Every structure is written in structure tokens, then in C-alpha cells.
Image: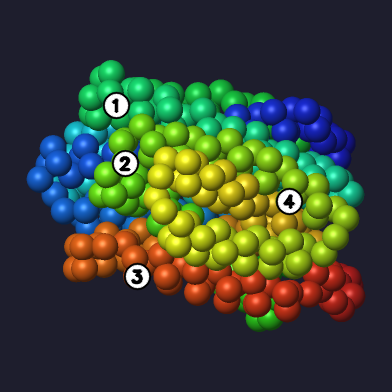
Amino acid sequence: MQNTDRKLSLAQVLACGALVVTLSMGVRHGFGLWLQPITQAQDWSRETFAFAIAVQNLAWGIFGIFAGMLADRFGAFRVLVGGALMYALGLAGMALSRDALTFSLTAGVLIGAAQAGTTYAVVYGIIGRQIEPARRSWAMGVTAAAGSFGQFLMVPVEGFLISGLGWQRALLALAVSVLLIAPLALWLREPGFGGGAVPARREQTIREALAEAFRYPSFQLLMAGYFVCGFQVVFIGVHMPSYLKDKGLSPQVASYALALIGLFNVFGTYIAGTLGQRIARRKILAFIYLARSVAIALFLWAPLTPASVYLFSAVMGFLWLSTVPPTNATIAQIFGVSHLSMLGGSAFFSHQIGSFMGVWLGGLLYDRTGSYDLVWYIAIALGVFAALVNLQVREAPIPRGPVPQPA
């Protein structure tokens, strides 16, 4: 029991956590590059591909709650290894699917479950438990920033793999690469989980923690904002390459645009996490959502050129996942860290419902109207809504009564 109080080193948590997120989020960030190669090869509609990715986002949200529970109870190591194996199987299945149902089950359900176990909810749970509160928001920003560099790195790599190997072999190559998450997980084994050690006693059961969070208005407001975040970023990430090609721009412009989003996401997430230690996080979140709406409106208004695409991608990249560190740090501050992975995963479920709606409506409305315009307008309106609701969040720790002592 003596080593249950020992913590992992700051450098170890940040380096390994960032590499895990780099692989998991980096591969995911480039899925939009596969939309046209797969739909053309399989003779599917865009809605078919979009629906599978929408299912992926929804599965990520659903399984994220349970992945968080398991990580809080048994440690993140087992969850990360299981997620890596599912990710590899899902990518292989995505390459070998011959019908829409199998594609939705592999690219959708299996990869979604894998992402639940290899991304922010699980890694941020480790940060919350292993790093002191004074540096927690900063550490989350650093991890997200380093992971964002993976998005910048992986998009051109994925584009190169598609052009060099073909879309199927490129997916199989990625399936091998995500298995690297498993050895990285060895360096994130937390003292107090496994090896005969028993995690510290919690003041709340899982049911009590969930009931408290879902009844608390500020948690509901954070979830509402996260819904909008998911809608906007996944619609743009998946459908913007096709939107640009429809407008006559080359596929290279789309690849560079997604890479720029990943690059500027590095700076945005780091700055958001750092500022979260100094100023009210609700104000940071409100600014991010409002700025996204302004950026989208200006993008639609301005003449479409490669230069305007790159400028828009840089601005959106700066705002892309910068919501994640302040949102998770706020949840930790309000509710504590005993159930942080689970509560972070629960809030992220709302994000993934928004992701489902954004990517699916993008494909559906395009097939119905021949244009993405309506979805862009919805994204603008939702950004204004999210800015307003996040200003109402109360960040102070939730008041609780004394913990009953045993007789």
C-alpha cells in the first residue's frame, strides 16, 4: 500500500500521453481524405460514408463513459491496450468491408469504441490523478497541443499513403501503426492500480457521481457547448475536402488545409490550457465558440481561393480542440478527480452526439440539396448559442456535505 501515494513523473505523463493522443487523434483527423476514394471505389453515396463516421462518433461517446469508468476503477493501462487492439481491427475492417453494414460496424462501432479508450477522457484522467491542481489545466493543454501536432503530421502522411499504396493498403498500414499505443501504455501504468494495490477509497459511488453531475446546471451547460464543438469540428473535418473539390480546388488544397488545422491546433490548445490557470475558463470557452461562428461566416462570405482556405484553416485550427483543456479542467475543479475519466467521458458523449449530427447531416443534406450551405449556417448559429450558454457556467467546487463516518 505504500506505493499507492507515489505519482508518475510529469515528463512521463506528458510525453506518453501526448504520443497516445497523437496516434489516436492523428489517424482520425485524416478520415475525410478517404471519403471520395472509398465511395467511388464501392459505388456508395456520400451519406453512406458519412453515416458510418457518424456512428463512429456516437459509439465513441457511448463507450467513452464506460471506458472512463474502467480507467477510474482499474487504471488506464488495460483500457489503452484494449483500445489499441480494437483500433487496429477497425481500420483493417474498414479496408476490407464490401458492404455498407460491415463498413458501419468496423469504421463506425469498432473504431468508435477504440477511440473511447485511447483519447482524451482516459489520458486526462491520468493527468488529473497524477498532476497537482495548480498545473492541471496547463498539463492538459500541453498534452492536447502535442497530440494536435500528430494531426498536423498524420494528415499529409495519410495523403501520401493513399496516393502511394492505394486507400486499402493505406488503411492496413495505419492499423499496424496504432498498435504502438500498447507499449506506450506501459509507461502510463498508475501506482495504485493493479499489482495487488487497491485504489484509494472514493467518497462517492459511480451512481452518486453521475447523478450529482447530471443534476448540476453547469455540467449541463458544458455538455451543451460540447455538443456544438462536436457538430462543428467533425462536419468540417470530414466534409471540407469534398466541399473544396466540389468548388474546383485540388485535393492537395484539402490536405494542406487539414494539416494547417492540426498545426494551429497545437498553439490553440496549449494557449487555452495555459490561460485556464489564470482567467475564468467559461470566458475562454465563450470566446472560442463565438470566434468559430465569425470565422465560418467570413469564410463563406469571402471569395473561395487556396489562400482563403488556408487562412480559414489556420483560424479554425487555433480554435479546433482548444475547448478540451478548459472543459476538462473545469469538470475536475467542480467535481474533483476521483471520477474524472468517467465524468469527462460523460460530457464528451454530448460532443459525440453533436459529431454524429454534424457529419451525418452534412452527407444527408448534401445528397438532398446538392450543397453544404445549410449545414454551414447551422454551424454558425450553434456557435453563437454555445458562447452564450458557457458564460453561465459556475467553476467553483461543488458544495458537498460531510462524508458519513462508519460507526
Task: Provide residue 163's location: percent of width, then percent of height.
Answer: 28, 23
Q: CA distance from mark 1 to mark 4?
A: 34 Å
Q: Is residue 365 above or below residue 270?
A: below
Residue 211 seen:
no
Task: Provide residue 15's location: percent of width, then percent of height.
Answer: 69, 28
Residue drawn 43% across the image and 28% down it: 156
Pointer 2: what residue?
249
In the picture as drawn, the residue positioned furthest to the front comes out as 303
**N-term-proximal mark, 1 vs 2:** 1
**N-term-proximal mark, 3 vs 4:** 4
Tag 1–tag 4 contact (CB < 8 Å): no
In the picture as drawn, the residue positioned furthest to the left comes out as 43
Which mark's residue is nearer the viewer, 3 or 2? 2
Q: CA distance from mark 3 to mark 2?
A: 21 Å
Residue 162 tag number: 1
Pointer 3: what residue?
374
SS type, badge 4: helix
For the residue marked with disc 4, what is the amino acid? Answer: Ala
In the picture as drawn, the residue positioned furthest to the top comes out as 164
Pointer 4: what residue?
272
